[in-house]
Image (cartoon, rainbow, N blue to C red):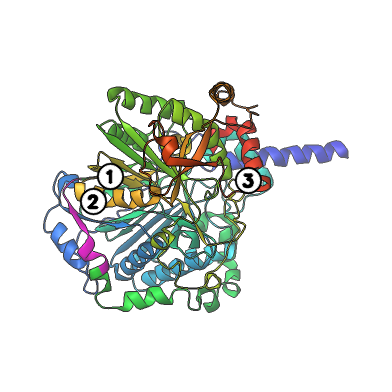
Amino acid sequence: MQKHLLKIFLTVLVATFISSCSFLGIGQGKNMFCAFEDLHVYEKISYENSAYSRLVDETFNGQVPVMAGFAPHYVNLLNTGEDAFWARVHLIRNAKKYILLQTYIWDKDETGRFFMKELVAAAQRGVKVRVLIDALGANKDLDFWAYFADVSPNLEVKFYNPHVKRINPLALQMAGQCAFRFDDMNKRMHNKTLIMDDQIAIMGGRNYQNDYFDLNRFRNFKDRDVLLVGPVVKQMTDSFTKYWAFQQSVSAKDMTDIDALIKNKNYLSKITDKTFEFGNLFKDFEDQLAAPQFIEQHFVQKAFRVEHVKLSVDLPGKNKLPGCATGSRATEELLDIMGKAQKQIIFQTPYLILDTYLVKGIRKIQKQNKGLDILISTNSLAATDHITAYAQSYKQKSFFVDALHFRIFELKPVPKDISSMLPDYNQHPEEFFPSHKDSLLEWAVDSITLPQNKRHVCLHAKSFVIDDKIAWVGSFNLDPRSAHLNTEAGLIVWDEAFTRALKENMDLDIALGNSWVVGRKSGFPIIKQLNMIVDKVMTTLPIGDVWPFQHIAMFELKDGADPVPFYDKRFYQNYHEVGQFPEVPVTQGQVQVILLKAFVGLAKPLI
């Protein structure tokens, strides 16, 4: 009897493994795509209720030029959650033919439900809506997705690279995925784009969650998008079309657990009108959008007219080779743009982790120009949302400073200029904002809880400035996942005025009182040199890096002193040391980082 039961169990186990590996394209040959849907709009579109109609008319006044990237475009920087919210809602409400949305995370919080409501309203007035979400970043509420997928024939939802044909996979199915297609399932879609009518688009770093639109009582992401009007948007539509037709993009109605709810309509008792009631949370946004001249004055008049832009976007599926052996289209284009720098490169990235491939690329660029100044704006431990990623960055920090000569600025959780970063910071009491601490990816990330539980910021923007002339804004983090595994998208802009505006916003983040400066510890020369030697040896170890000290620390500029680089002889006169992990309790975050630094080195490509 026991042998019979064991045989049945093994049969079920093998069948589950095989089914979990076969449906997403294992052994399907060279054809990576299903039938392509034509998502282009060929007729002239006017927006009678939008001030953007004038910019659309100007940039689409005839045939699209052969070199679309060299045609006139209009670009807005969306540096705050408020701007990003207003722009998205306005464009969704004015779309005529198509809305194409691509994102990594979609939560069921107030923001997720609000944008669901807006897209449903667009579909019900006749706009064709296509929504593509990475299956790992989609919330796991089946009723939520059953309603979204079934509410209108004009609205379709797909999930990118689900583990199996379920939004909530079974344990055995997950085991099968890990055993047979771990490398493939580890490649996620990190692109964030919103395209209206083939003519206007938003792309950048924001997902659909309260944190990305300044609406969380505690952590809020300081993020960045660009709003683009012009012919290159058609290339964005082409890219979305490829992802939509990709064989590993699976319709919500083909997910067995969602489809079961759609067939029996069980979700109707869970998703009701009350699901889309938000009290006064969005009242300020709605009041501004109702003002007749608001969009004209706040966005259209501030748009930059640029003559040269380029879309940089990975193909779905990313690299065909396993692991982190090669870069990708976006990675290579980013390194190529960086290679044109003569004086300075400024990175802004939430996570700063370099593997051998990225280090070689950066060193090649530095060899081409030995005087190149590289500045990094990133998160401190007190501000980060991903303590494991910070631990890996901490492990490499001495290498960044000593070998690569990076000038690193780590954002404070409550910067001096937080009211500029969160414009509503003093507008409402903290209790006005919702609090959702259950991260969708809680198994992979963690954050430090501030003792005061204050509203604070965490850097999430991904931007690059080259010699004050070239700008990149998109979804690319400076880490191995973005370089090799996650698909990424970015907009490159060759325009000094636009680049200057981007740099000014990044300069605010690294200014006195907003970020700590990373530098070498001061101290007795012999002790300092010994610490440097041990630190460097330990840093080379993938695991077992148990040395609890570093010769790298955080510094604050003294009142009235001039900012200088860490290698300037005046550095210790102008700055005072504030420790390795300022504002972080020893028992909470510091011990965690040191332990993670010691034992998760081999997992660097997965973080």
The amino acid beneath tag 3 is Gly
Tell me the number on the disc at residue 498.
Answer: 2
Residue 329 x %, y %: 34, 35
Labelled pair 1, 2 in contact (Cβ < 8 Å): yes
Say few, some or many: other residues with alpha carbon within 10 Å of mark 2 (under 14 / 14 to 19 / 20 or more).
many
* Residue 439 sits in quarter: bottom right
Q: Is residue 229 left or right of residue 277?
A: left
Residue under the point 31% across and 66% down: 91
Query: Residue 441 magenta-drawn?
Result: no
The amino acid beneath tag 1 is Ala
Residue 318 x %, y %: 42, 37
Q: Looking at the image, which is closer to me, 435 or 94?
A: 435
Labelled pair 2, 3 in contact (Cβ < 8 Å): no
Q: Residue furthest left?
A: 62
Say few, some or many: other residues with alpha carbon within 10 Å of mark 1 (under 14 / 14 to 19 / 20 or more).
many
Q: Residue furthest right?
A: 1
Q: Looking at the image, which is closer to me, 344 or 471?
A: 344
Tell me the number on the disc at residue 525.
Answer: none
Magenta stretch, residue numbers: 298-308
Tell me the number on the disc at residue 471.
Answer: 1
Q: Which residue is mark 3?
A: 589
